[in-house]
Image (cartoon, rainbow, N blue to C red):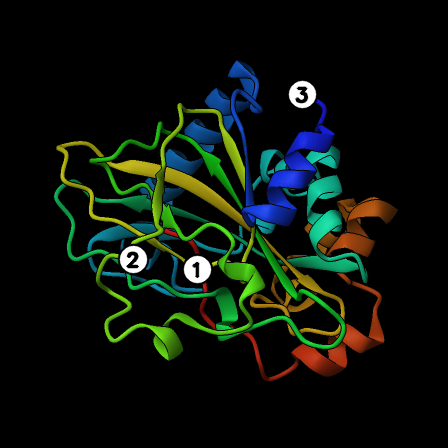
Amino acid sequence: MTTVTPAQRRQLDELGYAVLPGYMSGALLREARARVEELFDEEGAAAGSEFRQEAGARRLANLMDKGEVFRRIAGDQGVLELVGHVLNAGFKLSSLNARSANPHNGAPQPLHADMGAVADERGYSVCNTVWMLDGFTADNGAIRVVPGSHLWGKLPHEAMSDPAGPHPGEVIVTAPEGTVVVMNAHCWHGGTQNRTGRPRRALHSFYARRDQPQQQYQKKLLRPETLAALDARLRELLAIDDPLNDAVTAGHEGRSGFLK
């Protein structure tokens, strides 16, 4: 995997997102794709039910419990350096899911900020990463983003009459398979429609400031054998032994807010 650069950090500061082409090795890409498809086959109609299911897409949730390859991805040091650049007060994994946009799926997603949040007196609280298992094109449901909107301190519905409509400043983030996008999740963004005949697959590794609830309560969801296999670094990243996380997360799991 490539090393992050000062230019990528500047992109996060100024645009609200950084695109890392070719970040996934060919071997990692093949391994992640294979495991995702195995899980879709194994889980069938129940796929994604730990978090949410969605018309027009296949979903998987709780991936930290479903394969070592996913734990490698969520704990990737280079990506975590960029996440830490956004969430400089300290952070934890909030959730790791997969989403496969079905061929010819439905309407585009309204522009939004993840968790419906704007920066507060402590700074930014959420950061999302997208691991492209397929290339994102203008036709297959790529992400639209409004660069710089993380700096505005407001949500799309406060500034637009129709957040589902186009924004004059939006761009479509297209990139080949194996690309990773790190996004300040306060930046306005949304998924677009897959108008092609093929699914468009991605992993979403989502991080939150340590005082925020996890979307998926890792300590509660992980099987004992998975917990036992975590090293100290991953236990810290998943906030397994953090009483603050227990206090802020209990009863709050499942809040939505994902890039498509």
Q: Which mark is residue 163?
A: none
Q: Nearer the viewer, residue 84 or 221?
A: 84
**In this view, which residue lies farthest toward the top?**
26
Q: Which residue is mark 3?
A: 2
Q: Element under label 3?
A: loop
Q: Which residue is mark 1?
A: 188
Residue at x 21%, y 60% (from the top left corner): 55
Residue at x 34%, y 62% (from the top left corner): 111
Q: Report whether 153 appears left or right of 210.
A: left
Residue 87: % across, % down = 72, 57
Task: Please tell me how crowded label 2 is: few (under 14), some (14-19), or many (20+) other residues with Cα within 10 Å.
Answer: some
Separation of marks 3 and 1 at Cα, in angstroms: 27 Å
Q: Amino acid at mark 2?
A: His
Q: Report whether 111 appears left or right of 196.
A: right
Q: Amino acid at mark 3?
A: Thr
Residue 246: % across, % down = 75, 77
In the image, residue 167 sits, relative to residue 241, either above or below, namely above
Residue at x 87%, y 48% (from the top left corner): 232
Q: Element under label 2?
A: loop
User: Do the numbered discs 3 and 2 sit on residues whose CB atoms are within 8 Å?
Assistant: no
Q: Element under label 1?
A: loop
Residue 168: % across, % down = 29, 54
In the image, residue 218 sits, relative to residue 255, either above or below, namely above
Q: Amino acid at mark 1?
A: Trp
Nearest to N terminus: mark 3 or mark 1: 3
